[in-house]
Image (cartoon, helix red, strand yellow):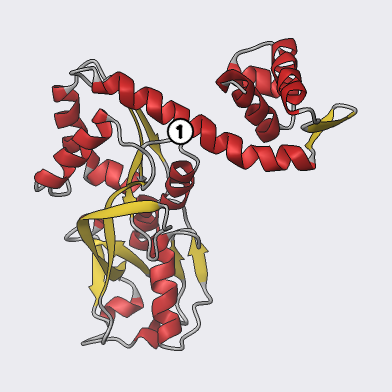
Amino acid sequence: MDLHSLEAFLAVAETGSFSRAGEKLFLTQPAISKRVSNLEQQLATPLFDRIGRDVYLTEAGKLLQTRATRIVNDIKDAQQTVVQLNEDHVTELSMASSHHIGLHYLGPILKQFAAAHPDAQLDVHFLESEQAIDALLKRDIELALTTIPSPLNKALIGKTLWTDTLHFVVAKDHPLAQRKGKLRLNQLASVRAILPDKQTTTFQIIEQTFQNHHIPLNRVLTVNYLETIKELVTHGLGWSLLPTSLIGHDELCILNIDKVALNRQLGIIYHRKRTPSRGVRHLIEIAETNSIKPTS
């Protein structure tokens, strides 16, 4: 079995099509078919059932898929390690960042990295933390700067760089803003909450908080980005939970909720079993050794 045949096999398994696999690998369909056919001959068993235009993994194909993925990833890691080990400069870096970190933390890190490695090819994806973790597990990216969930997948390593204090906020003219003293958490239950997607770590923090107090969290409007949430809250559409860096001095009112103090951990996540490239090691070093404050 050779690397190119395994890559062709995995591309067909992922896309469910020989033609789409060819597009993914920039090869013709006959070339993909030949590589898969050679692999099937070597293993003396069919890897796909071809029913009309549809392609399905056989039992043997399913068994090979997991092992082939591991083999291909290990070979690529080995190639990258050996190549960069013999180079004094970083050639590339593939990473992800959450939108929030991209707006408030990422700039100074990438500026220092780019200054040290002006010829490096930067491939930066802006993803929500759940998407970034999925990309790390699939080895599509090398590291992610994002919210660190708890618990974190055991295949990954997370290093906290910043602790984001989270505040309950409403618009200055919202009825809750007129209440004096501390509020109880159950006073928020009947008011619309504007929160990020239910799969996000931030949503899970607030959901767990309400569950711990045996309070239902029913009236929820989910919005993708914290910056958009802030705008909706500013216009009086409900309350939310936002980090300090997003709260303006005159735009929002911070609610003092009795016996509730929340925060989230932001930082670097990377794969435990993936050999870090020179670029990854240097970016981690920059992020860890510099006391970088969020931009306003």
- Residue 147, position as x, y percentages in the image: 33, 55
* Residue 93, placed above or below residue 211: above
Foreground residue among 34 and 249:
34
**Mark 1 neighbour class, 10 Å CA radius: few under 14, some 14 to 19, many 20 or more:** some
Q: Quadrant of residue 173?
A: bottom left
- Residue 187, position as x, y percentages in the image: 39, 86
* Residue 274, placed above or below residue 296: above
Disc 1 designates what residue? 74
Residue lying furthest right = 52
- Residue 118, position as x, y percentages in the image: 19, 18
Foreground residue among 151 and 217:
151
Instruction: Residue at 78%, 43% (x, y): give it.
Output: 59
Foreground residue among 296 and 48:
48
- Residue type at mark 1: give it: Asp
Q: On the picture, is 253 further left or further right than 192?
A: left
Position of the N terminus, as image quadrant, is top right
Q: On the picture, is 55 further left or further right than 137?
A: right
Looking at the rendered structure, the secondary structure element under dot 1 is: helix
